[in-house]
Image: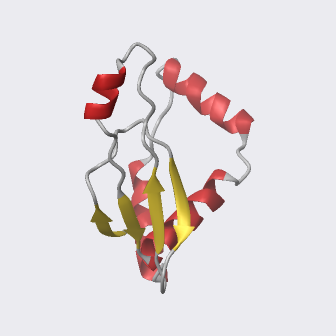
Amino acid sequence: MIQNISGPSAPPSSSASIEPGLGSSATVKTAPVPLPASTSAAAAASTAQPTADVSISAEGQAMQKLAEGLRQRPVNEQKVAAIRQAIAQNTYRIDPESIAEKMIQFEQSGA
């Protein structure tokens, strides 16, 4: 979770780096986006690119770590291909009772 943002927001195509922060948060510093070569020097000087500092809470860092772990898990490509084909052919069927049972089991497990 983002705890603190200071400075104007950076353009969406800017690059960012994460630096260790104090306590249990990290600081993200964004770098200015370079201006196109066709921009004049006067226009470039008058449109200084802002930077922003963002602090991410310990919970946010934990979520990032979890998301990275999920991205690194192996994927059963054959199963994914079979499901995609069934969806494309309009033959993929969902069993709502099975889904409901698994949701109840999940909630009862306290996860």
Q: Nearer the viewer, residue 96 or 42?
A: 42
Seen from this angle, which residue lies furthest bottom? 23
- Residue sitting at 50 percent across and 76 percent down? 21
The N terminus lies in which quarter of the figure? bottom left
Q: Up-down: is 53 above or below 39? A: below
Q: Please state if 44 lies on the left or on the right of 56 as rendered.
A: left
Q: Please state if 85 lies on the left or on the right of 98 as rendered.
A: right
Q: Position of residue 83 (x, y in %)?
A: 59, 32
Q: Position of residue 71 (x, y in %)?
A: 63, 51
Q: Is residue 102 visible?
A: no
Q: Quadrant of residue 107?
A: bottom left
Q: Is residue 17 visible?
A: yes
- Residue sitting at 44 percent across and 40 percent down? 14
- Residue sitting at 72 percent across and 42 percent down? 76
Q: Up-down: is 10 above or below 62? A: above
Q: Nearer the viewer, residue 11 or 72?
A: 11
